[in-house]
Image (cartoon, rainbow, N blue to C red):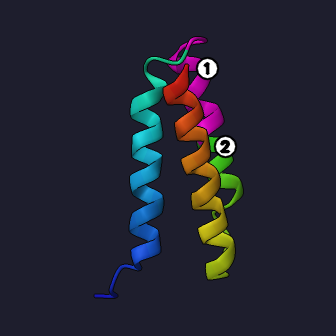
């Protein structure tokens, strides 16, 4: 069995956190979830560690913005 990358676990963690926060999104969960999925799917092919970390930082920023709503 292949070991799981710590970055992969970070991506999954932030995705789940954003999904949870999306339940209270002003335009509704049905609006939020497909857009979140599309945003993560667009970056699914990234293999460069620096690019993945940058994506995680962007997701953390979005998380803070949602929390501020």
> Is 14 drawn above or below residue 69 in the view shown?
below
- On whether residue 19 falls in the magenta region, the answer is no
Residue in view at x 67 percent, y 43 percent: 38
In which quadrant of the rendered image does the N terminus lie?
Answer: bottom left
Residue in view at x 53 percent, y 25 percent: 68
**Mark 2 residue element:** helix
- On whether residue 32 falls in the magenta region, the answer is yes
Q: List x then y, in percent, for residue 53.
A: 60, 69
Q: Report how many numbered discs are placed on residues in the image.
A: 2
> Is 53 drawn above or below residue 40 in the view shown?
below
Give the residue at the far bottom of this rendering: 2
The quadrant holding residue 2 is bottom left
**Depth check: 32 or 49 in front?**
49
**Depth check: 11 or 53 in front?**
53
Q: Which residues are magenta?
A: 26-36
**Overall secondary structure of the magenta stretch?**
helix
Q: List x then y, in percent, for residue 35.
A: 65, 34
* Label at residue 47: none
Task: Give the CA distance from mark 2 to mark 1.
Answer: 12 Å
In which quadrant of the rendered image does the C terminus lie?
Answer: top right
**Depth check: 31 or 53 in front?**
53
> Which residue is label 1 attached to?
31
Instruction: Give left or right: position of 5 versus 65.
Output: left
Q: Is residue 47 visible?
A: no
Q: List x then y, in percent, for residue 58.
A: 65, 52
Q: Earlier in the sequence, mark 2 or mark 1?
A: 1
- Classed neighbour count for the residue bearing mark 1: other residues with Cα under 10 Å, few (<14), some (14–19), many (≥20): few
Residue in view at x 45 percent, y 35 percent: 19
- Classed neighbour count for the residue bearing mark 2: other residues with Cα under 10 Å, few (<14), some (14–19), many (≥20): few
**Mark 1 residue element:** helix
* Label at residue 38: 2
**Depth check: 18 or 31 in front?**
18
């Amino acid at each position: 069995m292949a070991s799981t990358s710590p970055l992969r676990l970070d991506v999954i963690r932030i995705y789940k956190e954003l999904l949870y926060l999306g339940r209270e999104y002003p335009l509704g969960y049905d609006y939020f979830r497909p857009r979140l999925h599309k945003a993560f799917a667009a970056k699914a092919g990234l293999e460069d560690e620096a690019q993945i970390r940058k994506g995680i930082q962007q997701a953390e920023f979005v998380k803070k913005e949602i929390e501020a709503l």
